[in-house]
Amino acid sequence: MTNLDAALFIASVSLQKLTSTVHTITNTAPQVIFEDEALLVVDKPGGMVCHSAQRPEHTSLAEWLRDYGVPTPRMINRLDRETSGLVVVAKNEAVAKTLGKAVLRREIEKEYVAICQGAFVEESGVIDQPIGISQASAVYTKRIVDSIAGQPSLTRYAVEKRLRQFTVVRLMPRTGRAHQLRVHVAWLGHPIVGDKVYGPDETLYLQFIEHGVTNEMLEKLLLPRHALHAERVSFLHPGTRHPCAFQANLPDDMKAFIEEHP
């Protein structure tokens, strides 16, 4: 896609050598992409939770929004801690209800960019596989493709760029299951680079909870966080009813990885 290709030439970002024992996922703050009287669209950095977590030392996006001036943050979409990208925030209950109904009617279009392991066979396709909670995993939040008890889940994908041993893909979910994109590409045989749950070894997630990201873990993960970015969101503005679309460029860590693996 043109936007992605253009982003790769904005700046040359080199990966720093991994010299410390524990690596932080991010030290950046959210960036405001758009704001008016009805809503706020922010670019959340990877590594920040949307809501308060069990670890109070980690600042949440909700706390950041309150400090920014939104007393009651109403997030229309939420991202996993490690997923970077766009989050739409309603400034009042009426706007939240309008956009919430749009979500249920699947009128909010979202596009993600991911760096996946291996080479995709097809240039584009649809993953139509139900997702349920795993009953056998040591990670209690892990989901799996479950044809019996899973909920209907559909993801469209298109190859953006082929790298050495990796593929940059655009992912367009039509449903909003927890971990949907990560589960679907892993089921396809191409887990997202850096994914501690759906990647090479799910016990890496348990190690991460205890110790953070270490050099030893990075030998398997390749990145401190999973390489998934919510790049684009579009919908009808709840006030004007005009179509609007917002985009957040790829973060530096994903751009650097792509440049290091041409």
Image (tube, rainbow, N blue to C red):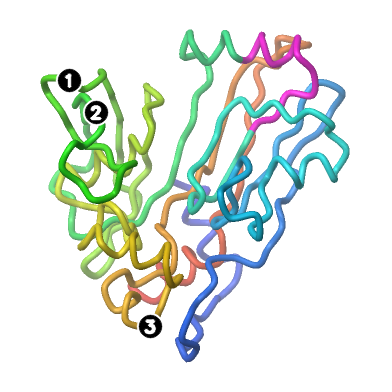
Measured from the top left, where is residue 72 in percent x and y? 78, 28
Indicate the secondary structure of the residue bearing disc 1: loop
Vertical comparison of 55 with 159: above or below: below
Label 2 is placed on what type of residue?
Gly
As drawn, is 24 to the left or to the right of 156? Answer: right
- How many residues crowd mark 2 within 10 Å: few (<14), some (14–19), many (20+)? many
Label 1 is placed on what type of residue?
Ala
Question: Disc 1 vs disc 3: Cβ atoms closer than 8 Å?
Answer: no
Vertical comparison of 12 with 229: above or below: below
Alpha carbon separation for disc pair 2 and 1: 6 Å
N-terminal of the two: label 3 or label 2?
Answer: 2
Nearest the eye: 30 or 6: 30
The image quadrant of residue 68 is top right
Label 3 is placed on what type of residue?
Asn
As drawn, is 115 to the left or to the right of 131? Answer: right
The image quadrant of residue 195 is bottom left
Residue drawn at 29 percent across, 79 percent down: 219
Residue 90 on the magenta segment: yes
Indicate the secondary structure of the residue bearing disc 3: helix
N-terminal of the two: label 2 or label 1?
Answer: 2
Vertical comparison of 100 with 58: above or below: above
Image: magenta residue range:
88-99
Question: Disc 2 vs disc 1: Cβ atoms closer than 8 Å?
Answer: yes
Question: Disc 3 vs disc 2: Cβ atoms closer than 8 Å?
Answer: no
Residue under pointer 1? 149
Residue drawn at 34 percent across, 67 percent down: 207
Residue under pointer 3? 215
N-terminal of the two: label 1 or label 3?
Answer: 1
Measured from the top left, where is residue 19 in percent x and y? 47, 91
Alpha carbon separation for disc pair 3 and 2: 32 Å
